[in-house]
Image (cartoon, rainbow, N blue to C red):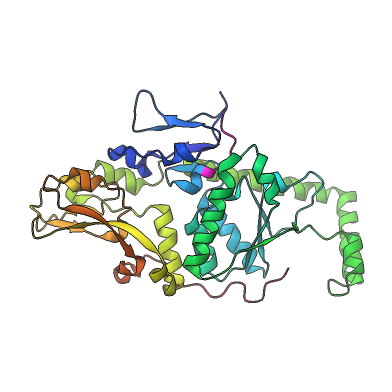
Amino acid sequence: MSEPKVIFLKEYCTRTFGSTCTRCIAACPAQALSTDKDDDTKIVVDADACTQCAICCGVCDALSSTRVTMLDLHERVRSIAQNGNVVVFTCKENVFPDLDLAKNVIVMPCIASISPELWTLILSEKITVRVAIDMNYCTDCKRGGSMGMPLYTYAIEQAQRWAASEIRFVDIIPEKPTLRRVLSDDTGINRRSAISGLAVNIVDAATGRRRKRNSNAIEQIRNARETARARARLSVDETIQASLAANEAMRTRIIVPKREMLIDAINNDPKIAPRVLVVVSATNMMECIDCGKCCKNCPTAARRIDADTGQLDYDRLYCIGCGLCVNACPQEIVTLESLKADAFNLDEYAGLISESPEEINPEPQA
């Protein structure tokens, strides 16, 4: 059996706490995901059937690529934008062997692997982003299948509504400039600089330095990928492991990655919050007997019993609206409600959330 390129992170899955959620299974176009026959709380990845589209990663925090995490992807986007470039996303289906892609192009296995929260975070940082794909290829794509287009169009439209900003689709994937283009481009680098650069390449090739440089670059890429794989293979975070094993009153609260990205986006641009509807739980505190049964079923410890008072301590910021607390409450006084994200109290988390970045890309280059 092949080594899986997507792994299951049990710590982020609500099935661990008793839910019957199968969103990732429903979204997988290759039917490569299933529940473990010996442990129904686990999701199994069939590495041979998996097309590595990573759509499941865009749908659920419990699935992660072993090559590039969403954190890695966000850092790459910021790196490109800091150099004054438009960030261009495309997918493997649109990249042909003869294309020499420009450095500002990011090739995704499928555009649907990017969640609405990540798109929103990128837009909140004033980064100009484009999607360069031919949608005709989506209809018979072997990776994303019929799920790709509806999922990425939904994610992008959702992010545009939340951020009140635009992600434009373009027809042309940027390529690296050839020497002929550089010499004929009056607005670009001058001829002397271009010829000078060419001379350096010729000397490097003659002395073997160029081969050594390429070798070093390949090694750096390999090391970076291995680091990402190692980070994904670890059980996400030691804090989560300790939290799951701890006493209910002492459990550390967990912000799932997509919620954290959304919070960062709101921190960058507070106007986003009133546009975002989130599903969270609510409790009739007049009838609550503080039995703590809802806390035991809460995957993120948004609900826990205060160690000092013995009463329910609830913070909707961490609530993911899974509904497990509703089913667990013997008093039947817990419900789910839709609220705007400005109902989150972010003041006490000011020290944990990064300061709003400056406009990274005020004058993007094509």
| Residue 200 placement (x, y as % from top left) | 87, 60
The residue located at (84%, 75%) in the rendering is 187
Q: Is residue 273 above or below residue 69?
A: below
Residue closer to the observer: 172 or 122: 172
- Give the position of the N terminus as an image quadrant: top right
Residue closer to the observer: 43 or 152: 152
- Give the position of the C terminus as an image quadrant: bottom right
Majority SS type along the magenta span: loop
| Residue 351 placement (x, y as % from top left) | 35, 69
Q: Is residue 11 above or below residue 194?
A: above
| Residue 322 placement (x, y as % from top left) | 31, 48
Report which quarter residue 309 is drawn in: bottom left
The residue located at (46%, 38%) in the rendering is 26
Task: Left or right? Give the position of 280 relative to 261.
Answer: left
Can residue 128 be found in the magenta stretch?
Answer: no
Can residue 51 be found in the magenta stretch?
Answer: yes
| Residue 363 placement (x, y as % from top left) | 66, 76
The residue located at (28%, 54%) in the rendering is 253
Residue closer to the observer: 323 or 127: 323
Report which quarter residue 181 is drawn in: bottom right
Task: Left or right? Give the position of 182 relative to 34.
Answer: right
| Residue 61 visible in the shown view | yes
Bounds of the magenta segment: 49-55
Q: How many marks?
A: 0
Q: Is residue 124 above or below residue 221?
A: below
| Residue 196 visible in the shown view | no
Residue closer to the observer: 361 or 161: 161
The residue located at (79%, 50%) in the rendering is 99
Task: Left or right? Give the position of 127 relative to 212.
Answer: left
Q: Is residue 168 above or below residue 41?
A: below
